[in-house]
Image (cartoon, grey):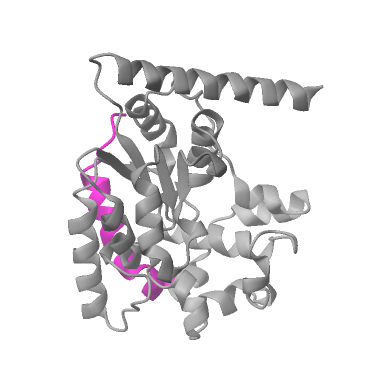
Amino acid sequence: MMRLLSKTRKFFRRLGYRIARCREDLTAQGKKPRVVFIHTPKTGGNSINTYFKEYVGSKGSGRIVRYDDFTSHAVDKFAACAQSAKFVTGHMPWTAFERCRDGNTFAFTILRDPYDRLRSLYYFIVNLPDKYERAEEINDIQKMSIREFLSSPERRVRFYTDNYIARQFAGSLDVLAETPAERARLAESAIQNLSSLDLVGFNDNLDGAFTEIARTAGLPAPCAGRKLNVTANLAASEEKRAEASLPLNEEMRALAKPLVEADMMVYEYFLKTRKITE
């Protein structure tokens, strides 16, 4: 019964969204912009993606396009599909975002304290069930301790851990910075690109950013507290959920420091120039 009720609500939400967009097309009222969410893993993006899916439609509708469904060599296909979508999302690097950006784009991202993001990422990976999409790709990482995860020199691990925020917004996720000078240049490029977005929100005030995003997209304001704790929810027990929520201790923060050096430059810059109304 509850499942049927949920499906009925979703049907009417999507119907209302389509009627509103058709009304815009038939009147002088300006069209709502296409919303593009550059999603950095473990920043609260699942809450935003779920909300848009409730109203805008499923991936199969063509109104939502996810970059994660496209491999690195399919950027042309992604850009073409994104042009006709209402909501574009995914763990896209800046180079992919630029391919789908135009004058009718409202683009945003959510930032999170880099140490906290790394901690959440680790516990998300180790608690992934076997049936989870792409879990097989990180199967060996699941066997690592958090110390091994943060200190691993292997490139396949560093892809997830090493200044991911700065790399994502500087241009390409394939580039790893090896020296402090390289990390500083990476951060500078990321800050310059991020500054061109319409909104840079923060995980610690997701409700504020969420309200502005929904308003721009012509959606009802979401209820406060919609942030989903996916990492903790994956844990199999209360003890593991509590462990997944603990901040890194001083020893682990010291190990993580070079992994977040550029990310912290980016995060602290935007903390000083918050672009959301609190």
Looking at the image, residue 250 sits to the left or right of residue 179; the answer is right
Residue 270 % position (x, y):
25, 49
| Front residue of this view, candidates 115 and 27 | 27
Is residue 271 in view from this perspective? Answer: yes
Looking at the image, residue 20 sits to the left or right of residue 266; the answer is right
Q: Quadrant of residue 114?
A: bottom left
In this rendering, the answer to whether 58 lies above or below 264 is above
* Residue depicted at 40% across the width and 54% down the height: 113
* Residue depicted at 51% across the width and 70% down the height: 252
Give yes or no for residue 3 being in the magenta stretch: no
| Front residue of this view, candidates 17 and 43 | 17
Count of numbered badges drawn on the protein: 0
Is residue 110 in view from this perspective? Answer: no
Residue 122 % position (x, y):
58, 65
* Residue depicted at 36% across the width and 15% down the height: 23
Looking at the image, residue 242 sits to the left or right of residue 205; the answer is right
The boundaries of the magenta stretch are: 256-278
* Residue depicted at 48% across the width and 70% down the height: 160
Q: Main secondary structure of the magenta part?
A: helix
Give yes or no for residue 260 being in the magenta stretch: yes
